[in-house]
C-alpha cells in the first residue's frame, strides 16, 4: 500500500521537460547554461513561449545558435547581446535596465511609493478631526465634578427602570 | 482646489483607458526590426540561379530597393508574388529576393512557373543571413536605401493597401534623401 502511494506521488512530481534536441555539450556547466538561456529568451514568432518550449522553426534555429555560442565559449551576456542585436528587446523576458526600460523596472516601486505617500498624507490630515470628535475621546477627557454627578444620576435612573 | 483633486482618479482611469484602447489596435505579432538604421549585415552567399556566383551586402547598395524574404514553403509568399511582379514592372522599384531556408530546385521552379520579379536572389539555405537580419517569418520585406542601410521592415504580405500606405511613400522619401 505504502509503496504504491509513493509510486503514485513520485509520478505526480512535475519534471521540467526540455526540448528534445539531441544537442551535445562538453560539460554539465554548458548544458545548464544552455537551459537557463533558452528559458530566458523569448521566441519571436510564438510570442508567449520561450525558445526552450517552442517548436517553431525560428526557435529551433535560435536554440542551435545558443548551443553554438556556448560551445564556442561565449558567456551569457554575449549570447543575450547577440539575440537583442538581431531581434530587439522583445526577445528577452528580462530586458536590460536602460533609458528606454527604466520606467518598466521602476514603475511598480514608484507606484507603491506614491501609494504609501498618499496614505501617509491622508492619515495625517484626518488626525485633528478624530481628536475633536466625541466618539474616540470619552476616556481621554476628565469629567468635572458637576458632570460626574449628572452621569451618576443618569446611570442610577437607568438602574431603576 | 480640493474639489479638482477629487477628479484626479477619474482622469487617471480615463488616461489608462485611452492607452489600453490604443493598444487594442496594435498587432502584437508585428515587431519592429532591431536592424533599423543599421547596414545590411555582411554576408557571402551564393546566388539562387547560379551557385558559383557569390553575393554580398555590397550588391544591395546603389538604389533604394526592397529586400524580400520568401520561400516556397511559405503560402503567404504565393499570395504576395503577383503584387511583387507589379511593383517591379509597373513601379520600377528593384526587388532583391532573399530565398530563406528553401530548396534550390523548388525555388527555381517557382520562379519559372510564377514569373520572376527579382533583380537577383540570395540563396540563404541555412537561414544565416535571415538570422542576422532578425527574420522571424516569411514573408518579410526590408526597405534598404542606396547606402545599403536598412530603413524599414514590413512583416507579412505586401498588397495594394500596404504598398500605397506604407512602402511607396517610404521608398520615395528615401530616394529623395539621396
Image (spheres, rainbow, N blue to C red):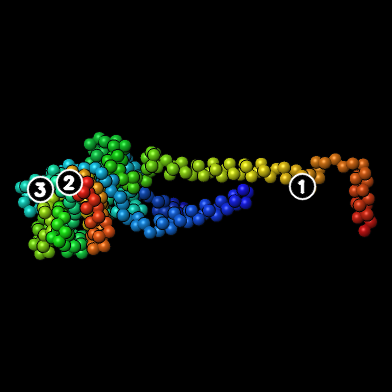
Residue under pointer 3: B46
Of all chains, the one bearing label 3 is: B
Q: Position of residue B64 (x, y in %)?
A: 18, 50
> Does residue A133 sit above or below B73 in this rendering?
above
Find the distance from the CA under tag 2 to the CA under tag 3: 22 Å
Which of the pair A77/B83 is nearer the observer? Answer: B83
Find the distance from the CA under tag 2 to the CA under tag 1: 79 Å
Name the side, left or right, on which A120 lies relative to B72.
right
Mark 3 on the same chain as mark 1: no
Mark sitting on residue A133: 1
> Does residue B161 sit above or below A53 in this rendering?
below
Q: Secondary structure at mark 3?
A: strand
Mark 2 on the same chain as mark 3: yes
Residue under pointer 2: B146
| Marks 3, 1: nearer the viewer | 1
| Marks 2, 1: nearer the viewer | 2
- Res. B141 image quadrant: bottom left
Label 2 neighbour load within 10 Å: few <14, some 14-19, many 20+: some
Which of the pair B61/A24 is nearer the observer? Answer: B61
Q: Secondary structure at mark 2?
A: loop
Name the side, left or right, on which B101 lies relative to A81.
left
Q: Position of residue A153 (x, y in %)?
A: 94, 50
Q: Secondary structure at mark 1?
A: loop
Q: Position of residue B51 (x, y in %)?
A: 7, 50
Discs 2, 1 touching: Cβ within 8 Å: no
Q: Residue at x 5, y 47 (%)?
A: B52
Amino acid at each position: 500500500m505504502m509503496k504504491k502511494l509513493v509510486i503514485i506521488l513520485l509520478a505526480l512530481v512535475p519534471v521540467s521537460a526540455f526540448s528534445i534536441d539531441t544537442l551535445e555539450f562538453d560539460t554539465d556547466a554548458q548544458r545548464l547554461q544552455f537551459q537557463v538561456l533558452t528559458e530566458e529568451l523569448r521566441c519571436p514568432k510564438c510570442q508567449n513561449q520561450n525558445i526552450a518550449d517552442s517548436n517553431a522553426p525560428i526557435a529551433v534555429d535560435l536554440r542551435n545558435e545558443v548551443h553554438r555560442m556556448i560551445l564556442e565559449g561565449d558567456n551569457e551576456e554575449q549570447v543575450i547581446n547577440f539575440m537583442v542585436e538581431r531581434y530587439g528587446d522583445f526577445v528577452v523576458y528580462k530586458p536590460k535596465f536602460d533609458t528606454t526600460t527604466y520606467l518598466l523596472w521602476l514603475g511598480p516601486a514608484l507606484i507603491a511609493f506614491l501609494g504609501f505617500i498618499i496614505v501617509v498624507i491622508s492619515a495625517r490630515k484626518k488626525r485633528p478631526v478624530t481628536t475633536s470628535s466625541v466618539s474616540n475621546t470619552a476616556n481621554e477627557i476628565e469629567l468635572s465634578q458637576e458632570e460626574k454627578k449628572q452621569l451618576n444620576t443618569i446611570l442610577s435612573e437607568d438602574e431603576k427602570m | 482646489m480640493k474639489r479638482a483633486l477629487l477628479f484626479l482618479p477619474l482622469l487617471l482611469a480615463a488616461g489608462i483607458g485611452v492607452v489600453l484602447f490604443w493598444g487594442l489596435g496594435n498587432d502584437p505579432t508585428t515587431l519592429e526590426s532591431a536592424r533599423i538604421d543599421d547596414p545590411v549585415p555582411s554576408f557571402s552567399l551564393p546566388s539562387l540561379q547560379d551557385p558559383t556566383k557569390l553575393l554580398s551586402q555590397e550588391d544591395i547598395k546603389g538604389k533604394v530597393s526592397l529586400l524580400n524574404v520568401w520561400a516556397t514553403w511559405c503560402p503567404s509568399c504565393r499570395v504576395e508574388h503577383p503584387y511583387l511582379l507589379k511593383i517591379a514592372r509597373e513601379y520600377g522599384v528593384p526587388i532583391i529576393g532573399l530565398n530563406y531556408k528553401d530548396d534550390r530546385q523548388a525555388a527555381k521552379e517557382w520562379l519559372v512557373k510564377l514569373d520572376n520579379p527579382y533583380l537577383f536572389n540570395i540563396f540563404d539555405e541555412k537561414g544565416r543571413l535571415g538570422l542576422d537580419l532578425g527574420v522571424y517569418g516569411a514573408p518579410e520585406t526590408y526597405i534598404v536605401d542606396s547606402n545599403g542601410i536598412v530603413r524599414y521592415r514590413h512583416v507579412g504580405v505586401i498588397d495594394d493597401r500596404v504598398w500605397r500606405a506604407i512602402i511607396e511613400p517610404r521608398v520615395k522619401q528615401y530616394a529623395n534623401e539621396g
